[in-house]
Image (cartoon, rainbow, N blue to C red):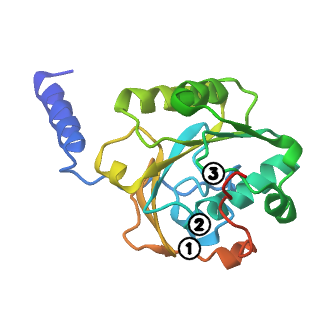
Amino acid sequence: MSAAAASTVVELNTLLDRKRLWRGPAPKPDTPSAAPTGHVELDAALPSGGWPESAISELMLAADGIGEIQLLLPTLVRLTQQGRAVVWVAPPYRPYAPALARAGVDLAQLHVIDADDQAPWALEQCLRSQACAAVLGWLPRADDRCLRRLQVAAETGHALGFLFRPEAAAQNPSPAALRLALQPGLLRVLKCRGGVAPERAFALNTADLNTAALPTAQLAG
């Protein structure tokens, strides 16, 4: 490679890293995603046509109980009815099992881990195990090193990873393949690997998912 060509490569990479050069989105896949979200508009907006596989997706919440579990419910139903394990790590509330069962979740495949301060470690082990189809974790605080370990663990274990984080965490960079911001009734894509995040927000209509009667969670006791 000539010196001029090498210089051009370096300059292009620098422009891409600094986000001063726009890169067109990857072409839409010809086959349906193996991990559809169950939300038609959201699937159409995501480059893979669904949740990124073997990867972490972050859900940034303006508050608890604004539809985050309802958003994931079609995925929970699909995976558990296929006989695949789903794990919740360190949920702030106790999952309301009767409502989940009425919605179609196979409770025999649903596991809850009360991890407290060991939540990052528990998440990493579950994601890496290859025994879990999906792992949901609540992380009020997580640095870049922690998130990168979780992303690698999801890739290794071929698992869907969902991290619930506070809205303020969206201000910090993340290796997650997908980042969503949830506000009451609204869903916005902040980052999607392999494409450009749509500018418009999506109406988060949980009634479309037949989960209007499903509380996000219920306090223990």
Q: Which of 35 and 93 is in front in this view?
A: 93
Whether residue 216 is visible here, answered yes or no, is: yes
The amino acid pointed to by label 1 is Leu
Above or below, 211 relative to 29: below
- Quarter of the picture containing the N terminus is top left
Q: In this view, does 79 lie to the left or right of 4?
A: right
Q: Give the residue number, with chain letter if any, for mark 3.
A: 93
Residue extending farthest to the front is 221
Q: Can you tell which mark lies on residue 204?
A: 1
Residue 174 image-quadrant placement: top left
Identify which residue is drawn at 54% across, 67% down: 66
The type of residue carrying mark 3 is Tyr
Q: Residues within 10 Å of mark 3 (few under 14, many from 20)?
A: few
Q: How far apart are marks 3 and 1 (CA)?
A: 22 Å
The circle on residue 68 is none
Marks 1 and 2 close (CB-CB < 8 Å): yes
Specify which label sits upstream in the sequence, 1 or 2: 2
* Mark 3 or mark 1, earlier in chain: 3
Instruction: Say left or right for 26 vs 118.
Output: left
Residue 128, position as x, y percentages in the image = 63, 24
Between marks 1 and 2, how big is the CA–CA gap?
8 Å
Label 2 residue SS: loop
**Figure quadrant of residue 205:** bottom right
Q: Which residue is drawn at 57% across and 26% down?
A: 124
Q: Position of residue 81 (x, y in %)?
A: 87, 50
Which residue position is annotated with label 2?
67
